[in-house]
Image (cartoon, rainbow, N blue to C red):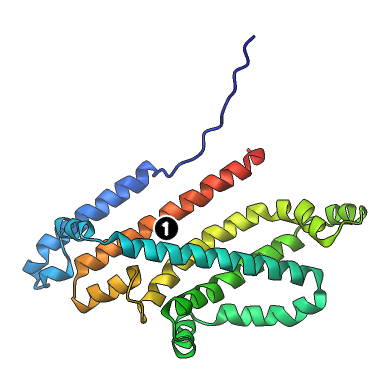
Amino acid sequence: MAHVEHRESVPVLTFPRQTIVSLLVFAACWEGMSHLAPLLGIPPFAIPSLLRISKSILTITPIDIVVTLARVIAALIASFIFGLVLAMAMYRSETLDQYLHPMIRILMAVPVVSWILFAVLWFPGVEFRIGFVLVVVCGPVFLVDTLDAMRNVPRELRHMMQSFRPTTVQFFLKLMLPAIVPTIFTSWKVNISLAIRVVTIAELVGAVTGIGHQLSVAQELFSVADVFAWTIVLVALLFLLEALVARVEHRLLRWRS
């Protein structure tokens, strides 16, 4: 009998029917408001038509999208490495954890706007400013999520692993890392959304490229259509990155299904 190999389908970015209907209803309401605005004394530029927004989307420069995307990805990778390494160190050293944990909580309590102002006052380079803000905001999230996941690994598994007298590297690679992979992916999904919002605000201050800079230009020109167009791009980037993470998650965690 011939062996038939069944391959699992990898989930792709799909939209439920309810989501599509909601978007269509919103689009119809927006279009209706754009036509009613002049009758209500509202300036036409305040609520642009969908046609005007579509024209703005067609004028978008890909370089700004690429720059923002590169900043987000680079900062997320740096934040993840920083959070993972520090979480492992705090897990192994209770003393280090007692000293650093309060500081991490303080960092997470500082508003993003404050970090941006600090970066402007402290650093001369725009790219370093944006990278600093992203890492200092996203890094603690990775750290706390990873550390909590390590502490939630069953004690029996930890004792069993320690009975084999593993090295620190073996302990984390053989037990901890596989156990916390689901939490890591959840943390990535949260931080992607956070990074998209933070990088936009950071680019508003001093950057000459990127989506945040283009939003600042649109604001100066009172172009609501351009603001709307760039906002749509940001949402699309968020969905794209989340779909990519979900695809990798599905491949690595196929054993759960």
Q: Residue, x 62% and y 39% (percent of image)?
A: 254
Image quarter in which the N terminus is found = top right
Residue at the front extreme? 125
| Amino acid type, mark 1 | Leu
Q: Nearer the viewer, residue 7 or 106?
A: 7
Q: Residues within 10 Å of mark 1 (few under 14, many from 20)?
A: many
Seen in the picture, residue 62 relative to 244 is either above or below; the reply is: below
Q: Nearer the viewer, residue 166 or 150?
A: 166
State the image coordinates of residue 46 (x, y, percent, origin top left).
17, 70
For mark 1, what is the residue?
238
State the image coordinates of residue 97 (x, y, percent, origin top left).
76, 76
Q: Residue, x 55% and y 70% (percent of image)?
A: 138
In the rendered view, does 201 fall on the left or right side of 39?
Answer: right
In the rendered view, does 154 fall on the left or right side of 66?
Answer: right
Image quarter in which the C terminus is found = top right
Q: Nearer the viewer, residue 41 or 70?
A: 70
In the rendered view, does 162 fall on the left or right side of 239?
Answer: right
Residue at the left extreme? 39
State the image coordinates of residue 227 (x, y, percent, origin top left).
26, 68
Label 1 SS: helix
State the image coordinates of residue 235 (x, y, percent, origin top left).
37, 59
Seen in the picture, residue 10 relative to 168 is either above or below; the reply is: above
Q: Residue, x 66% and y 82% (percent of image)?
A: 103
Residue at the top extreme? 1
